[in-house]
Image: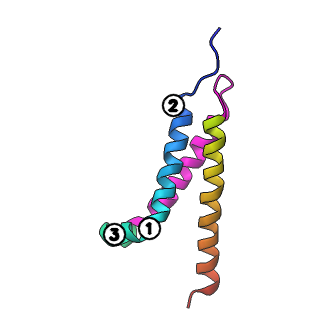
Amino acid sequence: MEGKRFTRRSYLALITNILLSLSIIGLDFISINVSEKLGVPLIFIFLIVSTIFTFISFTNKKERRMLAVFSSILWVINTSIIILFLWIGANFAP
């Protein structure tokens, strides 16, 4: 009988959440160097992908939960930052 271990699902969930965090932090740098039209959709693509991988990583019963929990904490933080930016942009934009 095999013990619980980390799988690719947990690592993909963690990596996509880290990439989402880095794209939120570097939004200005991404928008200046790549394109204004690519920065924000890139963040939403990472948000959707990280949401899918985070919830998929919880479904496997033979998998350890430490990376999945850390990934879900990052997901909640990133989602709250995005919602905060959207709320500020909707309510305080000229």
Circle 2 sits in a helix, a strand or a loop, which is it? Answer: helix
Name the kind of residue labelled 2 in the image: Arg
Q: Residue 87 versus residue 11: which sits nearer the camera?
A: 11
Q: In which quarter of the image is residue 27?
A: bottom left
Q: In this view, does 28 lie to the left or right of 66?
A: left
What's the CA distance linking mark 1 and mark 2?
Answer: 27 Å
Identify the residue at horizontal 48%, vertical 64% (top origin). Answer: 25
Identify the residue at horizontal 62%, vertical 12% (top origin). Answer: 2
The residue pinned by badge 2 equals: 8
Circle 1 sits in a helix, a strand or a loop, which is it? Answer: helix
The residue pinned by badge 3 equals: 35
Per the rendered image, the range of residues in magenta is 38-65
Instruction: Inspect the magenta stretch and tell me whether residue 32 lies in it.
Output: no
Name the kind of residue labelled 3 in the image: Ser
Name the kind of residue labelled 1 in the image: Leu
Q: Which of marks 1 and 2 is nearer the N terminus?
A: 2
Q: Does residue 78 sit above or below 53 in this rendering? A: below
The residue pinned by badge 1 equals: 27
